[in-house]
Image: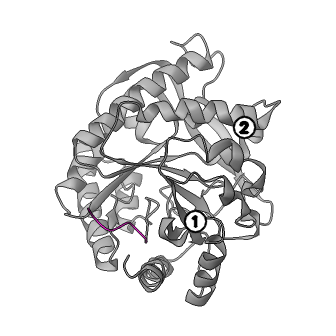
Amino acid sequence: MPDPVRADNLGSFLRPDYLLEARAADLPADELRKVEDRAVEEVIAFQEGLGLPVITDGEYRRRFFFSTIEVLVEGIDPLGFVRHHRNEAGEEQELRTPTPIARLKRISTLAEYEANFVRERTDRLVKVTLPSPSLLSVYWKEGVSHGYESREAYLDHLVELMNEDVKSLAEAGVDHVQIDAPHYAYIQKVMDVDDRNAKLRELVEIDNRVFAGVDGITKALHVCRGNDRSHFTGTESYDGFAAAIFPYTAAQRLLLEYDDERSGGFSPLQHVRDDQEVVLGLVTTKRDDMESEDELKQRIDEAAQYVPMERLALSTQCGFGSNAEGNAISRDAQKAKMELVVRTATDVWGHA
């Protein structure tokens, strides 16, 4: 049995300039795929060089972390829904997200599109991330999303399709499958909600169905507060909603944002089940300024008051490129922060 993963990887990395240029040039799909292949091979080598035990493709084939739906199915307008993130100064930034315009029809699987390429190129653990279906259902639009009589019907079909994808990933030898559900942290901002905890319980149960009938993988859940070009949406700590999520998710591994004052303290970890691991996202990907190893160790010790050290791990708070444009952070800082995660994890637990 492999050692527990102590230095984790949220999924996305800054794209190389040549990949961004290729996307901007609107190359034919087969030519763009070759450029993506080169970039993915480079980011695999980058992660291996850092000593990370879990490898992703950097999400280099995606415009956004949720963009898999755009390429795996027909029936999506990738820019059809408008929402906003903001930065620390309160300045808002538009984000366009995928909305259905017809009944979805599968054209590829996540294994075919992403995972197989990575699995063939590393002997380390492989992780694939995917957006939660309950997040994608937010982008259903009355009068536009033809093919479904309601948001609930769309959501049911999404769950069915995404469960197929998770099964394909397990069959392809993927080790970690991570659902990204940032909206859990700000659900009242994107849905009409009377009872937040009841709504979260409902969404968690829906998203759990993505893992139905799937064994042999580590099931993970990432809950942050939004991460788009160093902007965010959620402003609350986990205190108000952890009890509605942590005990009820099917995830064995919880990746949580703990990089700034919005994150609050570690007391919400009291709601973590005894069979769950917690990955502390203590290192920010939104800014260049560096955390110290001593600071990280102190905060890990504080978290260990609620979850035993043997069930803790360390990571960045989110990916570096949830949007292909990436966060406002340099490549040098990206490398330094990941080196810090690996080094600190090795000091604390004896290995990454």
Give me the residue at 35% from left, 60% from top: 19
Q: Which label belongs to residue 286?
A: none
Classify mark 1: residues with Cα within 10 Å, few (<14), some (14-19) or many (20+).
Answer: many
Classify mark 2: residues with Cα within 10 Å, few (<14), some (14-19) or many (20+).
Answer: some
Instruction: Using the image as rendered, state which of residue 260 and residue 13 is in the foreground.
Output: 260
Residue 294 x %, y %? 59, 89
Task: Please say whether residue 137 is visible from this viewpoint.
Answer: yes
Instruction: Using the image as rendered, state which of residue 166 and residue 273 is in the foreground.
Output: 273
Task: Please say whether residue 290 is visible from this viewpoint.
Answer: no
Residue 26 left/right relative to 344 = left
Find the magenta span and give its range.
1-6
Mark 2, residue position = 190
Instruction: Using the image as rendered, state which of residue 40 and residue 1 is in the foreground.
Output: 1
Q: Splitting the image into 4 quarters, where does residue 308 fall? A: bottom right
Would you say the magenta stretch is mainly helix, strand or loop? loop
Amino acid at the residue labelled 1: Gln
Give me the residue at 58% from left, 29% from top: 137
Mark 1, residue position = 317
Q: Secondary structure at mark 1?
A: loop
Q: Of callouts 2 and 1, which one flags the residue occurring earlier in the amino acid sequence?
A: 2
Tell me the quadrant of the picture where the N terminus can be found. bottom left
